[in-house]
Amino acid sequence: MDLEKKFHSIFKWNTIGSIFFEAMHIGYQFLLLKILGYSVYGLMGSVFSILYLTIYLSDLGLMTSLPTFANVFTQSKSNFKKYFRQYVTPNIFFLIIGIFISLFFYGSFFSANKSLLPPLYLVISLLIFESVRMFLRFFLHTQFKNKAVIVLELSLMVLYVTSVLLPYYISGVPITITKVIGLYLVNSIVSVACFIFITIRLYKKLPEKELVPYEHFKRKSTHARFFNHATHIGKHLISGEFLVPLFAIHFGLKQAGLLKLASIVAHSIKAFFKAAINFSGNAFLSNLKNKPLESRISAFYTLFKKLNVIIYFIFIVLLINFHPLVSQARTPGNRSAFIYLFMFITITLIQQLCVAYEQFYIVENAAHRLFFIKAFEFIMFYIVVGLSKHLYPNTTLLSIVCIQIISFALLALNAYAKWKIKPNLKINPKFILKTVLFGTLVFLLIKSL
């Protein structure tokens, strides 16, 4: 019960922090699009997409497997020094390989726009510091350090957005891709320094007892990381990180800019889920790892109930307002952006249903079961990507929506066969009524504009 209370507490903090952070992020991206224009914004978005895709792919299961082993690291100071180092060190090699591969694509994709691109040393530095930042952020969330992380990230986001936009609006200082990436690098360096400080404080509070052996740690962690990474590759590819550069190549920078804006809004919704559900859920489930299976299944349903509330709210509001939003768009470009946005949000909502199951699979050390489902998903996605040059952008995104629906169905069926758990999609009728009323108010507001 104490652990469940702690879960509800971090859920509340993560939810509030995520709402403020993502609202600020979306507003900032809209202003950047207005200032830079679709093509330059599409180029900048493609650079950031390649950067983050490199981080996710060179991660090699580092973050996705962390909930399985986080409790091992924090049993004692000696455990932290030995097992944490063994767990993290291999990723230095993987990240170096990822940097070289990403630089090859970076140079070949954007050779025609070199004058607009930032120096390579800025891109490489940002890639390194963001890799460390994302891992430490995730690790601290598993240790219920969410309040410190949220306050720090919100403060740094305010400073970053201010440093980019204020000189432009006050003194007319131009905003360039180099400036945006350079200031974000400074933001990342400060964040990493603060996270390291919090991690050191956490380490100093660990017990001074002898090393608590974990049998076959290297073999088990390698096994978990391989299968977890293999099962998450598809999720990183079915995202703006991969699709924005793909659109830049097949459909041009303007379409990439439109898709980037749509993916930013969808990514903010995903980030909200990640902060409110994924971080909280990973901490919750990982701390129940040594409890009976019934406790973990009960935790899964608690998690799914929270997920339902958010998904129903977003889906109902969007469903009510889809037509008026599209009809309000005054240009074909804006209409395309809205359609891309709704497609991306649909993909994101279905992915979050999958994530709730994937968290349970990972904590149960059943990532090998996920592997075959995700391999099938990846094959279908690869076929769509291969055909994308012959398809319209909307058809490409609609095909990806269908792939996600099939993937969720397979996950749910397999989980029911193994653990007898099923998606509980029930929701309080009063909540549905309140959401419909809110969506209707938004509808009337849009109509009045």
Image (cartoon, helix red, strand yellow):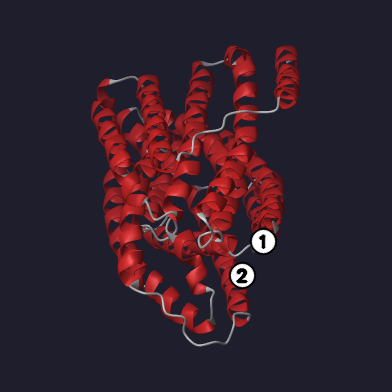
Q: Nearer the viewer, residue 256 or 307?
A: 307
Q: Can you say which quadrant of the picture contains the C terminus?
A: top right
Q: Nearer the viewer, residue 115 or 253?
A: 253
Query: Residue 394, which numbered label?
Result: none
Q: Is residue 260 above or below residue 445?
A: below
Query: Residue 194, which numbered label?
Result: 2
In which image quadrant can residue 122 be found?
bottom left
Q: Is residue 200 visible?
A: yes
Q: Is residue 61 shown left or right of residue 265? A: left
Image location (x, y in percent) of residue 205: 63, 80
Image location (x, y in percent) of residue 93: 30, 68
- Are the residues at dot 2 and dot 1 in contact (C-beta closer than 8 Å)? yes
Q: Is residue 298 above or below residue 350?
A: below
Residue linked to disc 1? 152
Image location (x, y in percent) of residue 236: 39, 44
Q: Nearer the viewer, residue 403 or 386?
A: 403
Q: CA distance from mark 2 to mark 1?
A: 8 Å
Q: Is residue 37 visible?
A: no
**Residue at the (61%, 70%) spot, across then down:** 194
Q: Is residue 420 shown left or right of residue 366? A: right
**Residue at the (28%, 48%) spot, across then down:** 105
Identity of the amino acid at label 2? Cys
Q: Residues within 10 Å of mark 2 (few under 14, many from 20)?
A: some
Q: Nearer the viewer, residue 178 or 283?
A: 283
Label 1, secondary structure: give it: helix
Q: Residues within 10 Å of mark 1 (few under 14, many from 20)?
A: some
Q: Can you say which quadrant of the picture contains the N terminus?
A: bottom right
**Residue at the (62%, 38%) spot, across then down:** 305
Q: Earlier in the sequence, mark 2 or mark 1?
A: 1
**Numbered label tally:** 2
